[in-house]
Amino acid sequence: MNHAIKQYPTSLPFPFSKAVEVGGFIFLSGQVSMAADATPIYGDVKTQTRVIMDNITRTLESVGAKLEDIFKVTVWLSDMKHFSDFNQAYAAYFSNGFPVRSVVSAKLAFDLDVEVEVQAVAPQAS
């Protein structure tokens, strides 16, 4: 069985792919609240979450997938006190049910408050 790995490079100045497709699945690198030029976008947790989810939406679309294809989400919060605000912003992106999810707290890059990593089903080749 051939499990070719397809890498989708990032335009950000960091050494990682924005997404990798393998075995019928898409794995996105962790997303923090960041502009296209790699400038961190600060603000409250709801703002950071919306920036991240919008970036995830664009990344998925760029590889032919959509939010509905996500089946697993891992979330890092700088402090669990942000859990409620994160959930409020996050929930707005899923109208057809939620993927499975894990949430942990950790010190995050650029002193941001939220990081999200997703796994999705790859679109079927036509």
Image (spheres, helix red, strand yellow):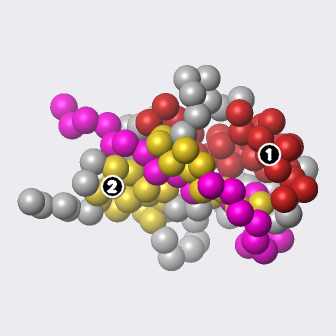
Residues at marks 2 and 1, CA–CA distance in whole angstroms:
27 Å
* Residue 11, above or below 92: below
Q: Magenta segment, which residues?
A: 102-126
Q: Tag 1's secondary structure? A: helix
Q: Quadrant of residue 84?
A: top right
The residue positioned 71% from the left and 29% from the top of the image is 92
Give the amino acid type for the residue marked by disc 2 in the picture.
Glu
Quarter of the image with the C terminus in it:
top left
* Residue 19, above or below 91: below
The residue positioned 55% from the left and 44% from the top of the image is 100
Task: Decide whether residue 38 is among the magenta residues.
Answer: no
Q: Residues within 10 Å of mark 1 (few under 14, many from 20)?
A: many
Q: Residues within 10 Å of mark 2 (few under 14, many from 20)?
A: many
Give the amino acid type for the residue marked by disc 1 in the picture.
Phe
The residue where tag 1 is placed is 86
Q: Is residue 106 visible?
A: yes
Q: Position of residue 115 (x, y in %)?
A: 69, 59
The residue where tag 2 is placed is 21
Task: Decide whether residue 112 is among the magenta residues.
Answer: yes
Q: In the drawing, does residue 53 fall left or right of residue 24?
A: right
Q: Is residue 32 visible?
A: no
Q: Position of residue 117 (x, y in %)?
A: 57, 56
